[in-house]
Image (tube, rainbow, N blue to C red):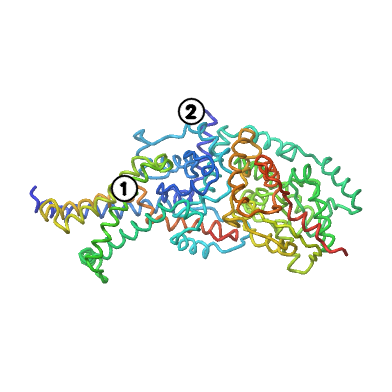
Amino acid sequence: MNEIEFLSWVRGPGFQIATIIFVAGLIIRLGETLLLGRKTNLAEAKGSEMSSGLRTIASRMLPPDMETFKRSTFTVTAGYIFHIGLFVTIFLFAPHILLLKDIIGFGWPSIPTQIVDAIAIVSIITLLAILAHRITDKVLRYLSGPQDYIVWLVTITPLVTGYMAFHRLGGSPVTLLALHILSVEVLMVLFPFTKLMHTFTLFLARWYNGAISGYRGVES
Amino acid sequence: MSASLKKGISALKEQVDSTVASFFSSCVHCGMCAEACLFYTETGDPERTPINKTEPLRRIWFSEYTLVGRLLKMLGLAKAVDEQLLSDWETLVYDSCTLCGRCSMVCPVGIDITDMIRKTREGMAVAGHAPNGLIGATQRAVTIGSPMGVKLPALQAQIGHIEKDTGMTIPLDVEGAEYMLLLSSMEIMNFPEFIEAVAKIFKHAGVSWTISSEAFEATNSGIQIGVSDIAAELVQRTVDAAEKLKVKTVISPECGHAYMAIRWDGPNLIGKPFNFKVRHILEVLDEFRKDGRLKLSGKEVQKLTYHDPCQIARRGGVIEEPRNLINMFADDFVEMPDTGKMNWCCGAGGGVSSNERADEIRLQVFQRKKDQLDAIHVDGIISACSNCRIHLEDGLEEYHMDMPVLSLTETIAEQLEEN
């Protein structure tokens, strides 16, 4: 397989396979979670489940209370930076928007490439710092298993390969682009079956947390 | 596999629902829950990270309720729950967690970690991996009716003393009373002043109340150890008594987990809604205040703070009420740093105080409370849980801090306007 055939494969069959696994995986994982159901609360309510659940979905997006922030400054700050960085590089980069427009039929405005470029660099550096933190912090080192490191790798790889492809660093542009697309496909295939799934399930988790607490009259 | 391990695994399976699945699916191992837990912050032991305490339940969820987990289990690659794991986790789940709920408040993806540790206890207890102190307390609760072995004659004796000292009547088994008061064994044995205080306040407010001779115990060891069948049996005793006496409201006393047990878990344990209300004593007193039935004349000039019992505040929803009440009499009330729903646990709730093995660690983690208190320099602490109260006294003594720990209900009774 030459590099043109490689690029055609990752753009064609490779992308289709990854998309099928990604979508089917999401459906299976959300299905096996939601179908378990939960019992109705029979205690007299002190607050609303629905509004508390929705409030917690939003409130846990915001910075935590001061004490928690002081105790977890790096985790919170680095978390914001790389999540915003991923969002910008994935969804606000002009070539990505064109690709998505091809698939879903509509697009949206992009932001200047130089800015996306800078944000990509910041995100890569932050993810490297996050790995160092995971290895050196005793709690994180204790909690971490192979999956935590694999997920880190498949998250940073598309950023690095994307940056390299855009700047034509270290290889032919065709090969670099193909490697970039392949790295995204690996991410998509692993997504539903790893902790990457939190992207979707955190809405359920936060809703339940808020609902459990709000039912008792406490904002969580 | 032993029969008890099988039972434990099946009890863990019963705990898995869509909340558990959403929670485990969302954990990214960020470690922030460790920093919210006094058993981690005061020991620095990473094993005590809250989410780690749920490992037995996580393994069951993964290997039984996810497609990938089931495939790995068939290939013999999924981590199993075995005797070794449960034995290793016993001290984490029971000695190093008070079910205080602080971790559930800081998790960025919203995991209610506390609820899952409580669920993990269901499997641990059935499999025979619960602390002896809690097993003993639970057995006494079932056979005698009280975890401390307090029988009716002991209550009657205390009532006799109070009636003799004050000339008031303590109503026992009065049918049709508006309120039925529950008591914790600790209040009956260590703080009978609480019963006297309630009698005074209810007389002052002109409200009818009673204690049931058949179900006066408020605490529920079944909740602490994590055996729902027993917890349900203990709740049912209260329900039967409340129905028999036809009361409108059952009052949970100054005890954290008792409130959780009867107010929030109770109807779910017995599988049907109550036909009476359940209120914490502080909610009842705050209602009296709103209705103008509570008239205080005294003022407390000492600098005071309030310790929120976890199960009453963060896990129970009674946060504003104590502050409304304290503001009626306190001239100099200050909050601790991290208060209300973010308060730090005293270190002895959730069955930790009934577990002798945890005596050392509960005093070690009291350092967190000491730091909170050191920041505000108060003359006294008010609280509303006799378990917190005893442990606060223990902790203050251990750290050579000299200040009184007051019951809010008792303090209010002392400040009542003379009729």
Q: Amino acid at mark 1?
A: Trp
Residue A155 in the image, given as x and y percentages of width and height:
29, 51
On the image, which quarter does residue A104 sit in? bottom left
Q: CA distance from mark 1 to mark 2?
A: 37 Å
Q: Residue visible at 84% across and 62% down?
A: B204
**Mark 1, other Cα within 10 Å: few <14 / some 14–19 / many ≥20:** some
| Residue farthest toward the top in the current orientation of the protein | B2
Q: Amino acid at mark 2?
A: Met
Of residue B277 and residue B283, the one placed in the foreground of this image is B283
Of residue A142 and residue B267, the one placed in the foreground of this image is A142
Q: Which residue is mark 1?
A: A152
Q: Which residue is mark 2?
A: B1
Q: Chain of mark 1?
A: A
On the image, which quarter does residue B231 sit in? top right
| Vertical comparison of B294 with B109: above or below | below
Residue B140 in the image, given as x and y percentages of width and height:
71, 36
**Mark 2, other Cα within 10 Å: few <14 / some 14–19 / many ≥20:** few
Residue B109 in the image, given as x and y percentages of width and height:
44, 54
Whether residues under marks 1 and 2 lie with C-beta atoms below 8 angstroms apart, the answer is no
State the quadrant of the C terminus of chain B.
bottom right
| Vertical comparison of B146 with B209: above or below | above
Q: Residue visible at 84% across and 57% down?
A: B200
Residue B232 in the image, given as x and y percentages of width and height:
65, 45
Of residue A166 and residue A95, the one placed in the foreground of this image is A166
Q: Secondary structure at mark 2?
A: loop
In front: mark 1 or mark 2?
1
On the image, which quarter does residue B121 sit in? top right
Please indicate, yes or no, whether residue A114 appears anywhere in the rendered image.
yes
- Could you say which disc has been placed on residue B288 in the image? none
Q: Is residue A62 left or right of residue B188?
A: left
Q: Are marks 1 and 2 on the same chain?
A: no
Q: Secondary structure at mark 1?
A: helix
